Amino acid sequence: MNGGVERTDRVETAVAHAFRDERAIVLATLIRQVGDFQLAEDAVQDAFEAAVTVWRRRGVPANPGAWLTTAARRRAIDRLRRDRSVAARAERLAELTRLDAQHEEPSMDVEHTIVDDRLRLIFTCCHPALAMPARVALTLRALGGMTTGEIARAFLVAEPTMGKRIVRAKRKIADAHIPYRVPPDEELPDRMRGVLRVVYLIFNEGYAATEGDRLVRGELCDEAIRLGALLCRLMPDDAEVWGLMALMLLHDARRAARVDASGRYVALDEQDRSLWDHGRIRDGLAKLERAVRLRRPGEYQLQAAITALQIQAPDADATDWAQIAELYGALGRLNPSPVIELNRAVAVGLADGPAAGLALLEPLLADPALERYQPLHAAHAELLGRAGDTAGAARAYQRAIALTANAVERAELERRLSALR
Amino acid sequence: MAQYMMLVYEAEVDPAVQDERERKLPMFVELHRSLREAGLLVGVRRLRSVESATSVRVRDGETEITDGPFAVTKEVLAGYYILECADLDEALKHAARLPMVGWATIEVRPVMPADEWLNRARAAGAELPDEAVNDLV
């Protein structure tokens, strides 16, 4: 093996590392400087391509991020000179040329500039004027560093479809003047909720993946957690940021135990706990602690607290159901929903006895909109069974079974039905 | 005298066909000028593609923002506003303040600046002087 090959490998590794660790920072800086998402992205792409050849010839620079930012800005200038159709072209060229005349890359050393740029980028990618699938794709593309092909595979759509979705979103950002900035204080809570929803949606897409496509889709969980960690760094005073991070970590820690060897879903209290990632659980609990200390309970924080109680108990019987019921109550006050109310009823049933739980189910069972909601009838059956009403429980199980399309779920309900007798 | 609004509906077409249309801009410039000289032209604006639209509704006190036009077949065009805003956020904020937003849908469409309209035509091959910009508003 000669030195040349070795050097090539080293350069390729350096470029790959820079792509993973610095691309989002370089892109975020450049979007601010050139004022156009698409142009910035094309220029950053050019810079990475140039890096492969230039670094091979002159060696890997001491600060790859700064090198890439300068190179990308010069590419942007070239592109602007060639493309007459870009709006406000003259002003942009003047500004870029002015920046280029400055020495080195001062912004790369100033932590807060980088923080601000990446925050701006997150809020732009998650802007409510973009359709949700576009927000998700754009966030993964710009901040997660996934390629269009990888995102397409993860969301089970054709690559050209995903490519069009991303291009269209970037065009809307430019044409409609979606601002590249952190929203003002009065809009921040609302917009932050929107950002967290995008991250949680990415996580759930990966988490819901079945065995067969786990390899491609599970990556979404890792990306969501990376985005969550970034938000924790950028917005450390927002309790929900820590709450979401805790929730994702506590779920993700149990990923391996969620499905058995035959692909069957395994309920929490039946999971093989030796398969849990206990380091990740500790990490999740620490993040939950941070959230709680900020004393502003929110949706994600409450869900994480419920999950933490379930995980920490040695088994279902030893779980603190009274506290879980209280947390569901708090969750329902923040965000009233029949699903949360159902969970609260089950927790109350386990804490204070089935009669108390059944009383809470009454209004849900009387709601025509929930008539065909399978989990309601399954929970009803469970509580009736515990109350000793075997006949009633059997009827409710049959109702739940009739509403189940999923073979695995049906088998589980049938097993419980036959266990009644 | 009465004022009439002429709404332009067109299908989106391939770039080649669109370029052909862009090259007809001198005809527009000429027509606009003659209409203005006759005292008939109140205003003309070209809108950006419908893909850049955002719809705003307020229902039960909640502002709903949706990507794209909010196509409800029962709703018909009832009026328009043109606002000069710093960015889309400011436009959406004012859209949500319009008194009819509680029952209507406000489609927020960016207006294409006249100079961009002119530059597009030029990029497609039309020959027009810089002053033509004045006949595109």
Image (cartoon, grey):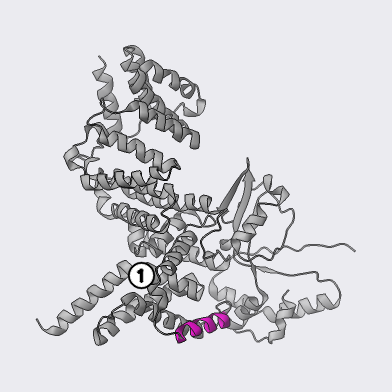
Most distant residue in the right direction: B1
Q: Please identify the quadrant where the C terminus of chain B is shown.
A: bottom right
Residue B42 spot, x, y in % from top left: 80, 69
User: Left or right: B24 with respect to A136?
Assistant: right
Residue under the point 57% across and 83% down: A90
Q: Residues within 10 Å of mark 1 (few under 14, many from 20)?
A: many
Looking at the magenta stretch, what is its main secondary structure?
A: helix
What span is colored magenta in the figure?
A89-101
Residue A396 spot, x, y in % from top left: 37, 20
User: Left or right: A359 with respect to B38?
Assistant: left
- Is A99 colored magenta in this rendering? yes
* In the image, residue B9 above or below residue A261: below
Q: Is residue B99 visible to the viewer in this orientation of the structure?
A: yes
> Hey, what amino acid is under mark 1?
Arg
Q: Nearer the viewer, residue A232 or B122?
A: A232
Q: Quadrant of residue B135?
A: bottom right
**Tag 1 subunit:** A
Residue under the point 55% across and 78% down: A86
- Is A126 colored magenta in this rendering? no
Residue B35 spot, x, y in % from top left: 81, 75
Q: Is residue A209 visible to the viewer in this orientation of the structure?
A: no
User: Left or right: A272 with respect to A396?
Assistant: left
Read off the residue under disc 1: A23
Q: In which quarter of the image is residue B93?
A: bottom right
